Image: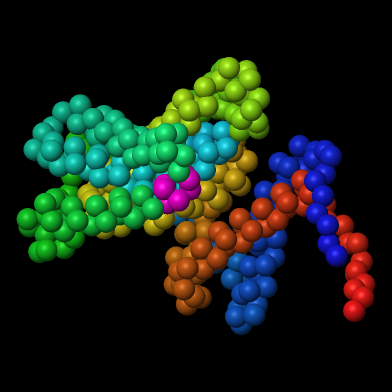
Amino acid sequence: MIKIEKRNEAPNSIYFLTPVLAIFLTLITGALIFFILGFKPLEALKFFFITPISDLYGLSELLIKATPLCLIAIGLSFCFKSNNWNIGAEGQLTFGGIVGGGVALLFYNHEGFYVLPSIILAGAIGGMVFALIPAILKVYFNTNEILVSLMLVYVSKLLLDYLVVGPWSNPEGFNFPETRQFSDSARLPILFEGLRIHAGIFIALISVFLAWIVLYKTYLGFQIKVSGLSLKTAKYAGYKGKTMILLVFMISGAFAGLAGVGEITGPIGQLHRMISPDYGFTAIIVAFLGRLNPIGIVFASLIVALTYLGAETAQIFLQVPKYTGQVFQGMILFFLLASDFLIFFKIKFLGFKKYEY
C-alpha cells in the first residue's frame, strides 16, 4: 500500500529552485524524445533553443512573444495568490482585443496623440469587464470560476469570428475574415527599424514593477496573500472576501486585455480570427514557473516564449510538427507540479496487505 503524508516543513530555497529542476528535466526528456525520433539529441536541442535566438531578429521575436505572456501571467498571479482560479485569460485577452480593435476602427480616419492611449485603455477595460463575469457569478451565485471563465473563452472567440466575418470585415479585403489595417496613430511604435519589436515591451516592464510594488509593498498585497493562505483567517481579520474576489479578477482581466490590445496594435495591426496562439493558457504555465513573483515571471515568460520560436525553427530544419513546442510546455508544467508535490508531500510504502479468503 502507498500512503501520502504532508511534510511538516518545506524549505523555501528548494521551492524556488524547482523551476530550474523542471527545465533541466524537460531538456533531458526532450533530448530522449528526439533520440527516439531518430535525431541527434544535442543537434535537435540546438535547433530548438539556440538557433532561434542566434541573431538580433530572433531576440526581438523572443521579446515580442514574451511580452503578452508576461502581462497575462502577472495578472494571473493576483488571482492565484488569492486562491481564485482564473483559467479564462485567453477569453479576456480576446475580448480586450475586440474592444480595443473597435476603438481603433472608430478612429480609423483620425490622427492624434489620444488615439493609441484610448485603444489601450479600452482594451484593459474590456478585459476587466469580461473577467468580472465569472467573478460576479462566483460571488453571488456560488458558481465554479474555473468552468465559467473557461467556457467564456469560446464565447469571446466566436464573437471575434462573427465580427471579422460580418460587420467589421474589411470592405476591400476580398471577403477574408479580417478588419481594415489600423492607422499609424493606432499602432504601437516600432523601436528599431527592420525589426518588429514595439513599445509594448515598456508596458510589460512597467506592469512588472507596479505588480511587484502592489504585491510586496502594500497592504492590498498582504490581504491578497492572506486570503489565499486561509480564507477563514482573512475573514477573522476583517477582510472582505467578496470584494477581494472581484478585485483580483478585475486586475487579472485588465492585464489580459492589455496583452490582447498589445497584439492587435503591435505585430498584427488589425483584427482577424486568430489574434493569439493560446497565450492565455500558456501564461498559466508562465505564472507557476515564475512562482507567482513578477520578477520570476519575466524570466519564465522568456523561457516559455522560446518554445514557440523553437517549435517554428524545428519545423523548418527537423521537419517535426509545430506542436512540438506545446509538448515542451506540457513537460515543463508536469515536472514543475511533480516537483512541488514531492516538496510538500512524502510517499510512504507500507508493504502489501494480506487478504484472507
The C terminus - image quarter = bottom right
Residue shown at 57% from the left, 61% from the top: 330
| Above or below for 85 versus 239 | below
- In the foreground, 280 or 223: 223
Find residue 131 and report its image quarter.
top left
The N terminus - image quarter = bottom right
Q: Residue 256 in the image: state x and y as whole percent.
A: 40, 41
Q: Residue 235 in the image: state x and y as whole percent.
A: 60, 23
Find residue 296 and report its image quarter.
top right
Q: Residue 125 in the image: state x and y as whole percent.
A: 31, 32
Residue shown at 60% from the left, 66% from the top: 45
Q: Is residue 147 magenta?
A: yes
Q: Horizontally, is 97 left or right of 90 in the view?
A: left
| Above or below for 7 versus 247 | below
Q: Horizontally, is 110 left or right of 331 in the view?
A: left
| Above or below for 355 versus 19 | below
Q: Residue 110 in the image: state x and y as whole percent.
A: 11, 34
Residue shown at 82% from the left, 38% from the top: 9
Q: Horizontally, is 298 left or right of 265 in the view?
A: right
Residue shown at 45% from the left, 69% from the top: 322
- In the foreground, 31 or 178: 178
| Above or below for 49 versus 105 | below
Q: Is residue 98 visible?
A: yes
- Residue range of the region highlighted in magenta in the rendering: 144-150
Predominant SS of the magenta segment: helix
